[in-house]
Amino acid sequence: MHYTHEHLEIQKTMRRFIDTEINPHVDEWEEAEMFPAHEVFRKLGALGLLGLNKPEAYGGAGLDYSYAMAFTEALGHVSCGGVPMAIGVQTDMCTPALARFGSDELRREFLAPAIAGETVGCIGVSEPGAGSDVAGLKSYAHKDGDDYLISGQKMWITNSLQADWMCMLVNTSDGPAHRNKSLVMVPMDSPGIEKAKKIRKIGMHSSDTGLIYFDNVRVPQRNRIGEEGQGFVYQMQQFQEERLWCAASSLAPMEQCIADTIEWAQQRQLFGGTLADQQWVQFKLAELKTEVEALRALTYRACDLHVQGEDVTELASMAKLKTGRLTREVSDTCLQFWGGMGFTWENRVSRLFRDGRLGSIGGGADEVMLGILAKTMGIAKRPPRG
C-alpha cells in the first residue's frame, strides 16, 4: 500500500489536532480515568475525520478503507492508548455494520450524527460470561408487537458511560448460536438501562469502560441492522476492520517506544560507557524495529486486499495476533532497558506497557486468533466459536 498526497494530508491534519487538542490534556484525562468524548468527537467531526470511508449521503467522505487506515495510523501519535481506542470504537467498531447493512432510516438517525461527531457510540458484544466466545452471549430480545424487549448484561464496553447509543449484539431467537443473533441499535437513554459500574483497568485509563444492565428495554424492531439472525455474521465482518484498526494504531506507539529507549540508552551512563554501547541492547532494539516494520507490511497488505473487496479474515487475524504479542514484547523489553525509570508511573514506556496489554485480549484474544487461523489453514478439527 502506498500513501498518496491525500493520505499524508489526512495524517498531517490529525497530528496537528492531536498536538493541540489531545496530547496537552492526556495526563489530566488519564488521572480522571475519562476524557470528554463529546467535545473531542465534535471537533473531529467538524474536520471530517470520523467518516472517511463512510457514505457521502450520511456525511462521510466516501473514500476507500486505505484513508481510514492512514487516519488510524496517525492516531498512534496520541501519547496514551485510551483516547485512540475510544475514537476507534466510533469509526471502526460500532459503525461499519450500520453503514454497510443499516436501513436508510437507521443510518440517518444514528450514522450521520456519529460521523458529524454529534453523538458517541459504543459496541455491545462482550458479556460477563461471553468475551471472546461471541456465540455464547446470553442477552435476549423478545418480540412484543413491533418492538423488542431486551434484557441482559454487557461488560467491558468502551465509551458506554458516555455513549448516546449502543450497537448491540443480542439473541433474537432460540435457533443455532451462529444464526440466532441480531445487531440492534439501542439508545442509551432508554428506560430499563442501568450504567451499573465504571470498570477500573490496569491501563487505557482515559477510556471509560462500563458494565451495563438491560431490564426489558423497549426498542423498535426497525432498529435492527439488516436481517434478523444475521448479527453474528455482520459482527464477524465488523471484527475484521476492528482488527486492522488494532494493528494500524499500534505502529506509531511501538516506534516511539523504541525511539525513546534509544535516546535514553545513549544518555544512560554505566560500566564506563553508555547503555547504548552494549551490543545486546543494540541488537535487540534493531530486532524490535524490524518486527514493527514486518507488522506494518502485513497490515498494509491486508488493507490493500480489503479495499479490493477480498476476504481478509486470515490476514487481519494474523495482524491482530502479531500486534498484541509484539506490543507486549516491545514495551516489556524497552521498560527493562529503562531500569528503575521504566518502573515509574509517568514514563511513556510504562504507559505503553499498561495500555498495550489489552491488545492480546480485546477484539478477540490471541487464542481466538490462533483458532481462526487454524480454521482458515484447514487444520482445525472443528470450527472455533469466535
Image: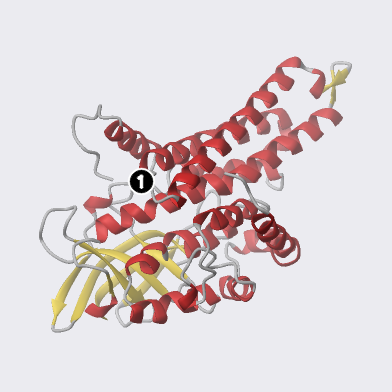
Residue 36 % position (x, y):
60, 71
Look at the picture and state if 260 lies above or below 71: above
Question: Quick check: 294 left or right of 222?
Answer: right
Residue bearing the label numbered 1: 311
> Observer-nearest residue: 304 or 70?
304
Front residue (pair 200, 154)? 154
Type of amino acid at the residue the image marks with label 1? Asp
Q: Secondary structure at mark 1?
A: loop
- The quadrant in which the C terminus is found is top left
Residue in the image at 51% along x and 67% along y:
62
**Res 140 → quadrant:** bottom left
Residue 17 visible to an observer of this rendering: yes
- Relative side of 114 to 278, left or right: left
Residue at 10% over, 58% down:
175
Quarter of the image where one finds residue 211: bottom left
Residue sitting at 36 percent across and 46 percent down? 311
| Residue found 49% across the figure and 44% down from its top | 359
Residue that extends furthest to the left in the rendered view of this protein: 175
* Quadrant including the N terminus: top right
